[in-house]
Amino acid sequence: MTRTDTVFVLWLLPWALLGILCILGLVPLGYVYGYGLASLLLGVPLALSSHVRQLMFLVLWRLGFKHGVTPRSREQHLRDHVPELFQRSGALLYVGAYPGRDELVDALWRTGYEITLLEIWRANVLHFADDQRFKHVICGDVRDFAKVLPDEPYDTVVWWHGPEHVTREQAETTLAALQRLAPLVVLATPWGLRENEMRDGNHYNLHLSTWYEEDFAALGYETATMGDRDAVRSQLLAWKRRT
C-alpha cells in the first residue's frame, strides 16, 4: 500500500472501533459525530486513494452489491442477450482472468464447458495453475494466441473485459483471428471511456482503447449496454456468430 493508503486505513480504524463501542453502549453517539466532523476533510480525499478504493469495491463486488453493475448483473446481462452460451457446452477459450475477477468462470464451468484459460500475466497464471475449473492454464498473449494454444478446436471464445487492454488496431486484428477459431465469440468492455491503473506491477491492466456500440457493430457484432456511458462499472457486451 502507498503512504496515502496507510494513512487512510489508520483514519478508518477508529471509525470501526467507535462504531463497535457505540453499538455496545460504551461510547455516546456524539463521540462518533465529533470524530466524523474532525476527520472529514482528511478522510474524503484519502477515500479516493486507488488501492484502498479498489479493495473496498472488491469486497462489495464479491458480495454481489445490488447497486450499479455487479458480477451478478453482468452475468444476467450476458444471459439475457446471449442465452445460447449457457445452453451449450464444448471447448471454450477464456481470455484473461485475475484473482477476484473471475466470477464468470464459475457460471461457464457449471454449464459444462471444458475451459482453457489464456492469461498474459505470469502471477495470475500461477494463481490459477491448479484451479480445477480449467482444463488448461496457459501463459500467453491473445494477440499471438496461435503460438501458445494447444492444437485443439474451440466452440466458443470469451474475451471478458479484455479488448480495452490492447490498442484498437491490435484488437481488430485479434478479433478477426478469434472469429476463425470458434463459431461464437463473446466480448465485454467498459462502455466508453474508462481509465484504469496498473495493479501490482501488471502494466497489461492499463486500458489502451475505448469502445462504443458502433465500434463493434462495424466489425459485425451485435451489442448491448448496461450502466451509464463513459461511467465506472458500465458494460458494453458484444457477440458474433459465425454464419
Image: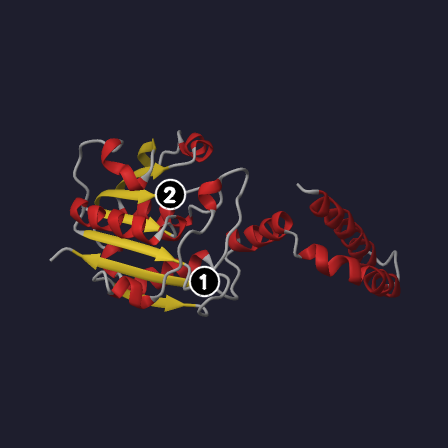
- Front residue of 90 and 144: 144
Sequence-first disc among 1 and 2: 2
Q: What is the CA distance from the residue labelled 1 to the residue labelled 2?
A: 20 Å
Quarter of the image for residue 81 reads: bottom left
Q: Which residue is drawn at 71% across and 58% down?
A: 45
- Front residue of 30 and 142: 142
The amino acid beneath tag 2 is: Gly
Question: Element at badge 1?
Answer: loop
Q: Percent x, y for residue 3? A: 72, 43
Q: Determine crowd level at label 1: few under 14, some 14-19, many 20+ residues with C-alpha closer than 10 A.
A: some
| Quadrant of image for the N terminus | top right
Q: Residue at x 30, y 68 (%)?
A: 214
Q: Name the residue under label 1.
A: 193
Q: Is residue 117 above or below residue 68?
A: above
Q: Name the residue under label 2.
A: 96
Q: Residue at x 48, y 41 (%)?
A: 203
Q: Percent x, y for residue 205? A: 46, 45
